[in-house]
Structures are given as C-alpha cells and as structure tokens.
Image: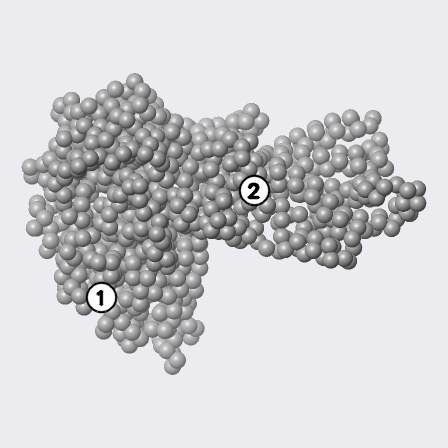
Amino acid sequence: MGLGWYIARRVAWSFVVTFIIVSVTWGLLTAAPNPEVQQAAQQAALAGDNPAEAQDRVRQLRGLDRPLHEQYIGYMTNIYTLNWGWSDSRAQPVTEAVTEALYYTVQYSVPWTLLVVTLGPLVGLYSSANQYSWKDHLATGFAFFGYAIPNFFFGIILLLIFGVELGWIPITYNTGVPVFSVENAIQLAIPVFVLVTGSIGGIMRVSRNESSEFMNADFVKTARAKGVSTFRIYARHVLRPTMVPLSTTMVAQLLALFTGSSILVEVVFSIPGLGRLLYRAIVAQDTSVVLGTSLFFVFVATIGNLLQDLVYTVLDPRISFDDR
Amino acid sequence: MHERGGDGERNGINRRSWLKALGVAGVTGLAGCSGDDGNASTGTESATATDGSELGTAEGTNTAMDELPDVSGTYRTDISGSLATLNPLYNNEQGAADVVSYALDLGYGFRPGTEYFPQLYDLTTDGGDVWVASVREGLQFGGDYGEVTAEDFVYQITELHQSDWAATADASSWPSEVNVEQTGTYEFQIELPNPNPLYPETYDPLLYPVPKALLEPFVGEQDAQGLENNPELTELQFVEGGNLGAYSLDQWNRSSNITFTRNENYYLREAEDVPDRFGNAPYFEELEVQVTQEQAARLGALEAGQTDSVAVPPNRVTEFDGMDGVDVYQIPQPFNEVCVYNMRDNGWNAGPGNLFQKKKFRQGLGCAVNKQALVQGVFRDYAQVQYTWQPQWSQWYPDESEIMQFGTGDLYGPEATRSRIREAISDTDYSYGNDGQLLTPSGDQVELSLYHSAGQNTERNMAQYIAQEFGDNAGIQVNVQAIDGTQFTNNYWQQQVPDDPDQYEWSNGPYNAGPREVTSANPWDMSVVFGLNTYPLNPTTASVFFSRDSSYNPYGYYPSWNAEELFQRANSAASEEELQPIFTEIFKNVAEDQPMGMLAFPADTVGYSAGIVGPAENFFSGWDFPTWYRNE
C-alpha cells in the first residue's frame, strides 16, 4: 500500500474533519438567536410597528423560514464554494477580508517560520557542541531572554528606539510598498526579529537537549574514529535524529503563525493581518468573519497534522505506514 | 449621536456624527477646554460667562489673502480604530463620518461664532415652522448620476428616512410629522409640526447627497441589506469624478489605511459665499488616514514627524506641546464625563431596593466627589467641571448663582454627603455604622460596581478616583471593573426588548425598552463608559436624556421635575430670547435633581505637526478643513 495510499486516506480524513466542524458550527449558529432578526424587531418597535411582523419579514428575506435541512444544505454549499457571507464590521465579503489579511500576515510569517526552523536547531546544535562553555550560556541566555520578554512590550521598545529615536524604520506599517522591496524588508525587520526571538527558545532548547544525547552516541564515536569531518558528523549524524522529535514542535510553530502572538505584534506594528482581523471581528461580534477565520485555522491545523506525519516518514525510515 | 466612549479623536471635521444614531465612537484621552489664555479656567469663584472664545468669533467672507497657499505633499492623520463602513446612509461612527467628509460634503456646517455655513444647500425660514432649502447649482455626482437636485434629497428623505424598512442612521431625524416637499429644481421645503428657530442647530436637516437613480432599485425591493452593502455607497464610488468633496477616495484598505487624492473640481472653489482661501482648495496632493491601534505607536509617529495629527492623552499634553515639531490644540467638544447610576431593577446590587432612585441619595453622591480635584488630577486641567447639562462656555449656560454646584465648596465633603444619604435612607433599613460605613439591612458594607472601558487610561483613573471618594465620603465600597465597550453596550447598556412591547406603558427600542422593570441582560450599578452629548448649540435635543419614555434612557431615570413640559415649551419657542429663561429653568432642575454624577467637560487635545495651518482652539475647528495647508 505504502505512502501514497496513506496520504490519500489522510487527505480524505481532513475533509471529514472539516465537515464535522463546519456542521457543528452550523448547529450552534442555528440554535442561537439571530441578531438580524432581533434588530428588525427593535427597529419596528422604535418606529411603532409590529415587531413580530418585522421579524417574519427578515426571516423570509434571509431564507430563515425554510426547513432546517434546506438551510443546512445551503450553508454547506456556501462554505465549500467559498461563499462565506458578508462582514458587517468591514463592509466587504468575508473571503475578501480573509485574503486581504492573509496577504499581510504571510509577509512576516514566512520569514519568521523559515528563520525559526533553520536557526533554532542550528543554535541548539552549537550549544550542545560547546556544552557548558560561555558560548552555550550565551546562546541559552539569548533564547530565554526572547522567550521571557513579552512580544508586544519588546516590540514597543524596539519601535521607540529604532523608529522614534533613531528614525530608521517607519513607526506604522506602510501597506503601499511592494512586497519584494527594500522598504518592505526594513519595515518588517523588527516585527520578524521580535517574533523570532520570542519563539526560537523552545526549538533551540529541545534541539540542544536532543543533540546532546547523540553527541556521545556509539555511531557518533564510530564516525569520529573513521575520520569523518566534524561538520558532517553534526549535520548528518546528530542533526537528523534530533529532527524527528523536533518536527512536532516545528509544526506547532507553523500553526502558531496565524494565531496568538501575531495579534499582539500586528497591533503594535499596525500590520493589518489575520490576527487583528479575528480579534476585531470577535470584539465587534462580526459572526461571519469569526467563522471564516476559524474555518481557515481548521484548514491550516488539519493540513499541519498531515504534514507532521509525512515529515516523520521522510526523516525517520524506521517509521513505516504499511501496517496502518 | 448621544454618547461617546473612549478617546475622542477628532480630525477636525463636521460634527454630524454627534447626533446621529447610537454607536460607540471609540477613542480615549479626553482633555479639557482651556480658558482664554491656555490657563484652564476651572475656578469656581470666577464667573464662567465665557468670552465666546470656545465658540470662536465670526469672520466675514471677504477675508482677503495676498496669495493662495501652494498645493503640496500629503496630510496624514492617525486614528485608533478601523471603520465598519463608509456608507453615508448607514454610518453611525464618529470616526467614519470624519473620513466620509473628506470626499463628500454634507448639506451645511457651522462656522466660528455659530454662523450657519451653507455647503450643498442653504436653509432659510420666516417663522421657524417652514424651512426652505435652496440647493446650490452645479453640484455633480460621479459616474452617470449627473447633477444634484432637490429631487435627490426629497427622494432620500421620503423613501428612506421616513420609510419603515430602510432603518437608516438618519431615520430618527425625520419623523413622519415632518412634511418634505419639492418646490423647484433646486428647492425643497421642510414643514415642521412646531416652529423651531434653531432647527439647523439640531442637525436634523443635515443630509448627504445620494443620487435618486442609485436608490431606486433598492427602494423598489425594500432591500435594506442590499443598500447597506452596496459598494457604490460603502466605498463612495458614486462621487468619484464628481465635485462634491475636497478629496477623492483612492483606496480603502480595511483596518490599515484609507488614501485620498486631491479633487481638482471641488465645488467650493467657485462659490461666492465662502472665504477667499477656498479659491484653490484643497492644498494637499494626498490625504492619508492611518489606522494605528497602539497609542504608543500613534504618539511615536507624531513625535517622529511621520504623521500630522493624533489625539494626545491629557497626561502627555505638556510633553508634546513642548516639542519643536508639534502643536497641541485644546478643542472644546460637547461630550461630558458622567458617572451613570443604574436606576432600573437590575441596578443597585448591594441589597434590597434601589437607593439610586431617590433624589436625596443622588444629591448625597453628588457631594462625594471633588470635581475640582478630578479635573486637575485626572484631566490635568484640560477640562472644566460640570454642574449641569451644558458646558460653561455655551451661550445657554445659566447664571452660576442659579444652579446648585454639587462637588464644590459647601456641597462637597463627608458631612455634606452623609447628611443627605442619612435623610435618604431614613425610611429604609440601611444605616451608617460606627466607623462611617454605609450598611445594608443585613449589616454588610454597601458594595457597588463601577464599569469603565478597558484600555482607556484616563477613564480608568477617573473611575478609581470616584471609588476612592465614595469610600471616603459616603462609606460605600466601589469595585472598579474594566469592560469592552461593545460588550457593555450589548449586555449592560441596552435592555432586552420584551417579546410583547405592548404590555408596557412604553417600549422604545434597545435604549429604553420599557419602564424600570425592563432590564439589560446583565446587572450593573454604575458606569463611566460613555460620555453623553450636551448639544451646546441647541440643547432641546438633550430632552432625550431626561424623559421617562424617550428613545434613550438606559439608566431608567424618572425626573422629579416637569421635564417633558419644559422641553415642550423649549421646542415651541419662537425665538432665542424666549428660549433662554426656559433653558435656565431646565438646567437648574437638572443640577438639582442629579440624574447622574455630572463630573467634567474635557476638551479634545489634538497634536498637529507644527507646519499645519488651519486648526483652531474653538468648537468649530475643522469647519474649513479643505483650506488647511502646510507652511514649510
């Protein structure tokens, strides 16, 4: 059967998972009172009309008077044909809102991820190669500093130093510059730096401890005895087994791109990305946007899980899928 | 708009939004009006009959200029919150109204000296009951919509604002008793049920122009949702290429920025009845509104010269005013700072009954807070104290001797507070303990909640100060709690509209869904989340706050004075002379009845780049925004 069959099944399963999640949200939404209908009643009461009539009219206009199964099918069709409704707090379609926000989020999340994924293990490896020396302590100190200082605070401080005092960077993100331009690199440097220092600590420490295990392993000693170059030992014999448990952390890292920390950083640096979109939508009770962004996260999470399992097989030939 | 929460950022534009609709116009950092020379005149001994500086002085239309400014560069302003929509018919946010006005003028405005300033139409009357609107000729919509005529306005009023389906932001300004008729190509008349000599000052007849042809399909279908979401309106496409605004909307990147370019064809350039400086307006090539949520970043941008206008919180005004590149202006505004008491049945959660409903008790609380200290400590003197429903600089402000000044002099302190509260609780089981604590019938100290907007530092400081004063002077423990503005509106401020509104004496929508037994979803005691509008140009509009069954009574106030009758008399007064004694009577009653803790009138404190010429320290700052320029 092999890998191909396994992937096919996993992808199909992702669809089932999203389907279940979307159905549950539909159920919850249908059970909750519809704000539009309530609003219509209030307006009618204000104007001295009959609120019940107004409610019926809105129900009819929005198709809420149809039988439940019809509403459900309509809803599911809309979701899977990317017709995610209208954002009241932004006066545009939800898909447009999500793509616009994603466009800006990706610009900092891609360099952030790449840097964390490449630098993290390298710094960890460097630390374990120089265990308990001042270099190790320095690298560890750096990792813990970044982990400990709150991103938003660090961001504001750097903004004050490099933006207000030195005037090297614009204080508010300028959406008007091309993606691949020096200006864009300059304005994204600080946010990316803040995010990398904030999230590199975990990966760095895990890789340090994992690789320390292998530093004195038999196969490393054998390699040394054979006269393999130090670089090759670290890269081929230590780093590779280290990466297997790390890949789990990495995927979690990838998912974190679109959540938590990015909201704070987006607020501080005025980047109009997904984090801020979701946050504002929640505060403004813009249900369709909250749903849209949540669906996007569901999609990312299922894909992430899938990738995680695939990475395992590539990195560790001992894991086989034949019997799954 | 009746209320505002947060940090009153304003970019100096029209004030239509003060009136219209109900929404949170988010922003913080309010600061107070200065007196005549920058020293805040909040002294209570000084008579506060103002010299009119807050309302500005009238200027003639012929203020000659040697030469018009050069057109150059970009004007940038930073605001804290992104905008929900730019649809002129459905917008109810202050910030959005400001942004819309860059690209689309309203019917009229006011100039310093409270002088009517006709933009799209002039309003004239003989007796105050029939107002004639004369539309300026040569006004062009964008696209194929052609010229703006009286028909467009009349259609908008009668088919949308007076309809029962459209639910526009202006609907409350056009009750069905108001009769609107087209009387010529460029003329329509508005017939009021009662004469109103100050009708324009109510802002009720204030309209945006919207082409009839654009509206017709939606009117036919009665499709409010379609009208609300139409990109021609939400992105102001219907004015692109016309001459109705100083700038043209270029791009609206939601939650990031909005950019405009100069409109070569702005109609006021050619107008005869405006100052010469409109001759080549506007004077910036581009205009940018940047959404910067983080206050530190907004202020940093101002300091670094990357933006031209940002609201500055009171505790940082001195610092910014001292910078070379920044001038901070104190601009009077009409919203007050009030501590609202919940007199509905879900208020007063300390014990049985609701002491807030007793006038004597409210007067006691009025004596508990030292307003002078509040203005100095929290608002750094960029505010004036408030005793009644009018700022001291308003022409309608009564003579000081006429009103009770709670929170000052003899009407401040533990004795003044406790003696009144004792009187109020004499027929209840509440009592004062030996250590001066107000005790519930079961013997516990009275504890009340006080809500403020999360993230608004000035407001939080005010709430904490009130809590401290209530503790010291009234023996009441106050728990200060932060809450999100939207959450507060939906679950505390608005009541749940009853399923059968007819079972109550009145039910007027979410802000007054019925008598005191109709309540909001969650209980609450006190709030400083919203400041309320005092309508200094025409306080008759403020009647909405003081009648039991108005459309706006979230706090369940039942006046112990003849509010309805007095406002009725004010509404039917035929002249300003007739109005003055009526307003004096009203404001005397409000001061005495203490419907809520009336604390302070902060001014907006706005920092501008030093080179910007145009802003002024009066109520009408920004009326001539198209003529602002940068003096390099």
Q: Residue A14 is drawn in which quadrant?
A: top right
Residue B360 lies in what quarter of the image? bottom left
Q: Badge 1 local density, few (<14 within 10 Å), some, or many (20+)? A: few
Q: Chain of mark 2?
A: A
Seen in the image, is B310 located left or right of residue B589?
Answer: right
Rendering colour mode? one colour
- Provide residue B151's location: percent of width, then percent of height: 20, 24
Residue B327 % position (x, y): 31, 51
Residue lying farthest bottom? Answer: B434
Tell me if residue A247 comes above or below residue B479 in the rendering. Answer: above
Whether the residues at callouts 1 and 2 have beta carbons within 8 Å, the answer is: no
User: Image point 78% across, 55% down: which residue?
Assistant: A131
| Secondary element type, mark 2 | helix
Whether labels 1 and 2 share one chain: no
Instruction: State the residue in front, B80 or B18.
Output: B80
* Mark 1, residue position: B43
Q: Compared to A318, does B598 lie above or below?
A: below
Residue A146, disc? none
Amino acid bearing label 1:
Gly
Residue A111 in percent (x, y) is at 62, 38
* Residue for badge 2: A189
Give the SS element for disc 1. loop
The quadrant of the rendering that contains the N terminus of chain A is top right
Number of other residues with Cα within 10 Å of mark 2, as a class: few under 14, some 14 to 19, many 20 or more:
some
Residue B588's x, y, as percent? 17, 61
Viewer-proximal residue among B516 and A228: A228
Q: Nearer the viewer, mark 1 or mark 2?
A: 2
Examine the rendered structure and indicate whether residue B38 appears above or below residue A109. Answer: below
Disc 1: host chain? B
Amino acid at dot 2: Ala
Name which residue lies at 38% across and 43% down.
B307
Identified at 72% across, 51% down, the residue is A205
